[in-house]
Image (cartoon, rainbow, N blue to C red):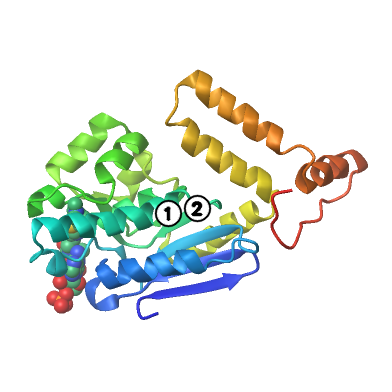
Amino acid sequence: MAFIQLETQGAVATLTIDRPKALNALNSAVLEELDAAIDALDLSAVRCLIITGGGEKSFVAGADIGEMSTLTKAEGTAFGKKGNDVFRKIETLPIPVIAAVNGFALGGGNELAMSCDIRICSDNAVFGQPEVGLGITPGFGGTQRLARLVGPGMAKQLIYTARNIKADEALRIGLVNAVYPVEELLPAAQKMAAGIAKNAPIAVRACKKAINEGLELGMDDALALEEGLFGSCFETHDQIEGMGCFMSREKPKPKPVFTNN
Ligand code: DAK
């Protein structure tokens, strides 16, 4: 792949978007490679994915403005669908995904980060949805995910004003969970990913499904969803091993290959 690097260490995979001449902006080729890289993940072995940007200046500086500048209405819709489909694939990937935001996360870059389960960033990170300044709306889920993450009032302010915010403000409004000096960001993401990967994978996957799908439901249906997923953990290797080891004061032994039982 020309723009995506995918490295796996143990149960943690790191996907780097690397298009330095355009601050890792997303053109069609990058989106297609991103989609293929996600499909190529071996989900029987990988238990957590980190997404980051190449270099120290930018996570992703948005969708590629040069490519978008000449699109027709039909092409613009198709481009939006391409991004939406791959971001949704990331959001609904069975395993947790951490965005390690190392610099600019603007427009499609912020939207990519928001399709991940958890966002942490470097102290030089800059977030924003500048689309209305370019004559378009956020097109890769920004209007929907930002409002769900930081609330409609703050999301509307950021989107209508097209104002960029720095890492400390992103932390304050809950857009990111933590801020690190730039050289400490990837080690922090790897440490968090390793901590997730050592937990029972069936249960971790069920938690992701319960939170994501439950947020779309009313409370009664959401609790019924949680009950079903809770019940599905019983009689699995993870539950038998996890509870058995607690009772016998032993350390649970991870299963090397993921299975549903
Ligand atoms: N697209 C293309 N190239 C980009 C880019 C981008 N988004 N961002 C930066 N670059 C390129 C620059 O053109 C420059 O290339 P050269 O001139 O060297 O060839 C190179 O990266 C370095 O950028 P700068 O020289 O500008 O670097 P600075 O440090 O001075 O400034 C910056 C960094 C990030 C503040 C600045 O580059 C900037 O403002 N970039 C644009 C950021 C932005 O507006 N991003 C949002 C893009 S809009 C939709 C689908 C998707 C979307 C919307 C609708 N549908 C179809 C419905 C999503 C839209 C967006 O993401």
Give the residue type at disc 1. Answer: Lys
- Measured along the vertical axis of the image, is residue 13 above or below residue 115? below
Asked whether the viewer can see residue 32, the reply is yes
Nearer to the camera, 170 or 252? 252
- Say left or right for 223 vs 235: left
Name the foreground residue: 179 vs 109. 109
Residue farthest right in this picture: 248
Q: Is residue 159 above or below residue 14?
A: above
Q: How many numbered tags mark residues here?
A: 2
Is 247 in front, or is 218? Answer: 218
Q: Inspect this view and state whether residue 106 appears.
A: no
Image quarter of residue 106 = bottom left
Left or right: 162, with 29 as reference point = left
Residue at (20%, 41%) from the top-left corner? 158
Label 1 neighbour load within 10 Å: few <14, some 14-19, many 20+: some
In the orientation shown, which residue stands out farthest toward the top?
220
Q: Which residue is drawn at 10% across and 55% down?
A: 73
2 vs 73: above or below = below
142 or 214: nearer the eye?
214
Cβ–Cβ below 8 Å for labels 1 and 2? yes
Give the residue at mark 2. Answer: 93
Image coordinates of residue 95 in percent, x first then y, are 56, 53
Marker disc for residue 57: none
Residue annotated with mark 1: 89
Q: What element carries label 2?
A: loop
For the residues labelled 1 and 2, the Cα–Cα distance comes to 6 Å
